[in-house]
């Protein structure tokens, strides 16, 4: 006997990832250049760095979606497009762009003005975190290079420290961003996004324990922050 289930309207995982990350790229660029070229709002060195770091982060995400990630399922419910895009377009798009680039000395929206050496150190920390995040994604993709549904315990770069180093490194990159910019909107995004990734890490840890049992328990990895929790 064959059973069929109506999953409702579906959309490809890759399409959702591409669209959700496209929003912040367009929003940051549009807000920044509109404020500069239409309203003549001068941008500080920190604000210029904030633009480049935000756009590069999401360009990297687009590249990974096209050439790195392996999706175990072909589609997801269409509703997820609006839910996921709402998070990225509003929280990391409109929220960051409006409150970072509209800052002026007379406004209430604070943006850091740190020594140049500190700015460069934070950019280097951000770059380290982004590259490390990319490396962990390559390792995860390698597990499914031949079988997109393959499931195994990942080892190596970062995976000997925490369950999901890709989440940890992403949080680290946004921490560097928040320290660089200093605006409350960056801290809001850091807290919300890291909280969500922490929940995902706990679920992944539980799945590893259920699937691999004692073999996985012996690794003694932290769940989210190396050597801490």
Image (spheres, helix red, strand yellow):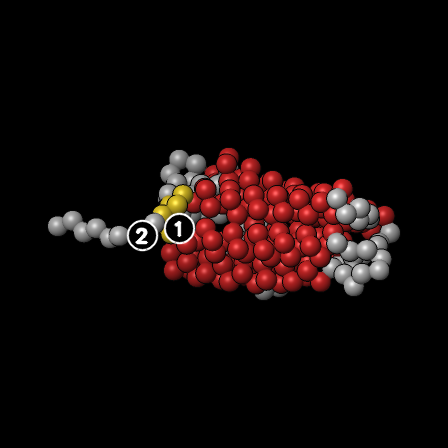
Q: Residue furthest right?
A: 115
Badge 2 crowding class, 10 Å Cα cut-off, few under 14, some 14 to 19, many 20 or more, is few
Residue 228 picture location, percent across and down = 62, 64
- The residue at which mark 2 appears reads as 8
Q: Position of residue 157 (x, y in %)?
A: 58, 45
From what the image shows, is residue 206 above or below residue 118? below
Q: Residue at x 80, y 46 (%)?
A: 40
Q: Is residue 206 visible?
A: yes
Circle 1 is placed at which residue position? 78
* Position of residue 227 in the picture relative to residue 18 (left or right): right
- Out of 53 and 157, give the one closest to the viewer: 53
CB under 8 Å between discs 2 and 1: yes
Q: Secondary structure at mark 1?
A: loop
Q: Which x, y percent locates residue 183?
A: 74, 59
Question: On the rendered image, what quadrant is the C terminus found in?
Answer: bottom right
- In the figure, is residue 218 to the left or right of 34? left
Q: Estimate how packed mark 1 is, as few (under 14), some (14 to 19) or many (20 or more) residues with alpha carbons within 10 Å.
A: some
Q: Residue at x 12, y 50 (%)?
A: 1
Label 2 secondary element? loop
**Farthest left residue in view:** 1
User: In the depicted view, which residue is nearer to us: 87 or 103?
Assistant: 103
Q: Which mark is residue 170?
A: none
Residue 6 or residue 57, whichever sits in front: 6
């Amino acid at each position: 006997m064959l059973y069929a289930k109506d999953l409702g309207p579906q959309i490809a995982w890759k399409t959702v990832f591409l669209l959700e990350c496209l929003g912040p790229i367009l929003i940051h660029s549009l807000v920044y250049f509109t404020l500069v070229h239409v309203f003549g709002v001068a941008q500080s060195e920190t604000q210029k760095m904030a633009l480049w770091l935000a756009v590069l982060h999401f360009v990297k995400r687009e590249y990974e979606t096209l050439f790195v990630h392996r999706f175990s399922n072909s589609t997801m419910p269409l509703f997820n497009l609006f839910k996921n895009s709402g998070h990225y377009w509003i929280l990391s798009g409109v929220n960051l762009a409006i409150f970072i680039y509209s800052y002026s000395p007379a406004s209430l929206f604070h943006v850091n003005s740190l020594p140049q050496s500190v700015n460069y150190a934070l950019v280097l920390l951000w770059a380290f975190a982004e590259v490390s995040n990319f490396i962990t994604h390559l390792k995860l993709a390698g597990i499914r290079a031949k079988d997109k549904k393959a499931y195994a315990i990942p080892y190596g770069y970062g995976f000997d420290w925490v369950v999901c180093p890709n989440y940890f490194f992403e949080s680290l990159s946004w921490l560097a961003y928040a320290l660089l910019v200093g605006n409350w909107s960056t801290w809001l995004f850091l807290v919300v996004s890291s909280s969500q990734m922490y929940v995902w890490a706990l679920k992944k840890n539980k799945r590893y324990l259920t699937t691999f049992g004692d073999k996985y328990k012996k690794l003694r990895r932290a769940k989210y922050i190396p050597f801490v929790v």
